[in-house]
Image: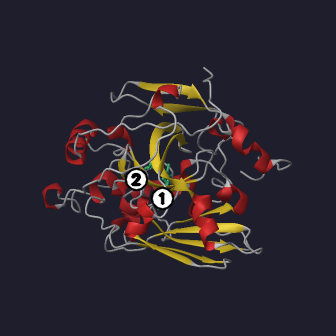
Amino acid sequence: MLIKIPKKSELSENQVTQESVYLQRRQLLKGMGFIGAGTLLSSALSSKAHGSVFDLFKEEEKPVFTRKALSYSGQAGAENFPEKLTPEGKVISHNNFYEFGAQKHQPAELAQGFKVNPWQLKISGEVDKPVTLDYDRLFSTFALEERIYRLRCVEAWSMVIPWVGFPLAKLLKMAQPNSRAKYVAFETLHDPEQMPGQSSRRLGGGIAYPYVEGLRIDEAMNPLTLMSVGLYGKTLPPQNGAPIRLVVPWKYGFKSIKSIVGIKLLEKEPPTTWNLLAPHEYGFYANVNPGVAHPRWSQASERRITTGGLLARNRIETLMFNGYGEEVADLYKGMDLRKFY
Ligand code: MTE
């Protein structure tokens, strides 16, 4: 089935659910029965990533993370977006955040005590005016807007998520990149005390932390590229990358790095976490491309996670650039996307 894609991805919704994160988490734990395994890992590593985390996680001892309502200017409405939003309960319970475990249910459990305030995000490197934003300024420096985007994981599942945030371009312009700035490197917090996956190979999947990512400067400046501070009208929960993360909707989800503390403008292409771990599986560009299979997954179709039931999962065709070709195809004119995967 081909889905009709509206030109811009600017659609918005102000749909704040009242259920508490705590209740959703409990419901999920029951429903999931703690089954699952991290699948991004290359096969050699994945056998080592299994194992129980019950010894590390005692539910009753963890403080529950409270999310605050965000004020933002919506644009259009969710009613105009042709696809169903993924329910909030799914968005915040089926996660990839290896710093908190390589299995989908683990981040929602193990990240609940994560401290996001105080926080510092530094923009440095090839810029005329380095910038540092503290926790409050992440939410108050730029007007917040809502964007409904598809998120397509390289593991061939996808969601539709109403993010709240601001264009990365605004943040970069504030720092005034100089003429040598050709790439943008991103870095996640490195804090093994808070992020158990960073000190345990079993939990953290053998990744060399901190998690790092990168974009070309023109990709970073594209209006679709978002710095997100919230979803479903509230601040991000820790498992989705609080307090601030990147969202690049035309690329596989692993480019959308979470809990960012550093952004550096560079002359050369920066290293990226999954490329370092398994270069034959994960490239720097990672544009969603149904014509280029991953060694372990065809990318021709995807399982859209929509309704809550485990059986209610839809298989749909994957679209080139995740359906955002009109906005981004020009960035790759003349490039062989099989080579630059
Ligand atoms: N960022 C960090 N720091 N660590 C991670 O493990 N996982 C990535 C990305 N960002 C990851 C990360 C992957 S593989 C995906 S698919 C998305 O986050 C998932 O985002 P979500 O959990 O909010 O759906």
Residue 205 lies, with reference to residue 84, above or below; the image says below
Q: Position of residue 85 (x, y in %)?
A: 44, 32
Q: Secondary structure at mark 1?
A: strand
Q: Say which residue label 1 marks.
A: 245
Amino acid on which disc 1 is placed = Arg
Residue that extends furthest to the top in the rendered view of this protein:
1
Please say whether residue 42 is visible from this viewpoint.
Answer: no
> Front-most of 181 and 98?
181
Under circle 2, the secondary element is: helix
Asked if residue 96 is positioned above or below residue 177 in the image, the reply reads above
Measure how far apart labels 2 and 1 are at the Cα level: 8 Å
Rendered-image quadrant of the N terminus: top right
- Residue at image position (38%, 67%) is 136
Choose between 299 and 237: the one closer to the eye: 237
Numbered circle sitting on residue 240: 2
Give the side of residue 303 with respect to residue 17, left or right: right
Could you say where residue 72 lies in the image, as x and y percent from the top left? 43, 48
Q: Position of residue 35 (x, y in %)?
A: 31, 42
Q: Quadrant of residue 204?
A: bottom left
Within 10 Å of disc 1 (Cα), the crowding (few <14, some 14-19, many 20+) is: many
Residue 220 quadrant: bottom right
Q: Give the x, y percent position of residue 223.
A: 64, 50
Nearer-N-terminus badge (2/1): 2
Q: Is residue 34 visible?
A: yes
Q: Residue at x 39, y 24 (%)?
A: 312
Mark 2 surroundings within 10 Å by alpha-carbon count, few (fewer than 14), some (14 through 19), many (20 or more): many
